[in-house]
Amino acid sequence: MSPVARPTFVEEQALAARGFSRVAGLDEVGCGCWAGPVFAAAVVLPAGVELELVRDSKALSPAQRERAAEDIRNKAAGWAVGQASAEEVDFLNIRQASALAMKRAVEALPFRPEYLLIDAFRLPGVALPQKSIIRGDATVASIAAASILAKVARDALLRELAERHPGYGFENHKGYGTREHQEALRRLGPCPEHRRTYAPVKKFITQAA
């Protein structure tokens, strides 16, 4: 298997040449999960920074993501994480909840960015220039960094939720629709962290009624 290509700074450098020095990469994780919040991160990387492990978060092992996240937090010019709860996912729908998590991440940055690079997403209602990039988490350094921080933060929360709601296996599947998760729903029914508008969860609510 060929090694996973490292994301580049081509987009950030092109924007810097146009006068944008604070470019934030944005990505979200957890859209397809049956339980737990959707998370997003915003990362502004300084020019010339070396981040050896930064890749699309899905291409890294959990241990590699933890090391990469620490490196990003230490070297980034600014970073922040935002989330939208399972209840907000149900109330808004997953796309709007993802946008809300991204907005919260941008607002939590230590300074206002000048431009947003977003993985396959347009962020409405934000008065900043932005660009949506398909597969940005695999090709753009700041977006890849954001994908790592969002994934690490969400996984940490799901481990906490596993302690609050034992028996569901959140520490293993992190809220995704695995067989283990399906069997837990069959045995226990949904917990407060489940997204009740999602069909696989709604099925078990209907059966319980």
Image (cartoon, grey):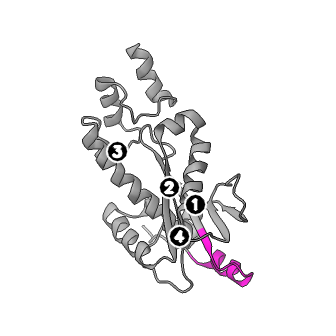
Residue farthest along the top direction in this orientation: 209
Residue 23: within the magenta?
Answer: yes
Residue 86: image location, x then y, percent? 47, 38
How far apart marks 1 and 4 lie (CA) works out to 8 Å
Residue pointed to by mark 3:
173
| In contact (CB < 8 Å): disc 1 and disc 4 | no
| In contact (CB < 8 Å): disc 1 and disc 2 | yes
How far apart marks 4 and 2 lie (CA) works out to 13 Å
Residue pointed to by mark 1:
107
Q: Give the camera-side residue of 104 and 204.
A: 104
Residue 142: image location, x then y, percent? 55, 71
Residue 186: image location, x then y, percent? 33, 24
**Amino acid marked by disc 1:** Glu
Residue pointed to by mark 4:
110
Q: Earlier in the sequence, mark 4 or mark 2?
A: 2
User: Looking at the image, is mark 1 or mark 3 nearer the viewer?
Assistant: 1
Q: Residues within 10 Å of mark 4 (few under 14, many from 20)?
A: few
Residue pointed to by mark 2:
82
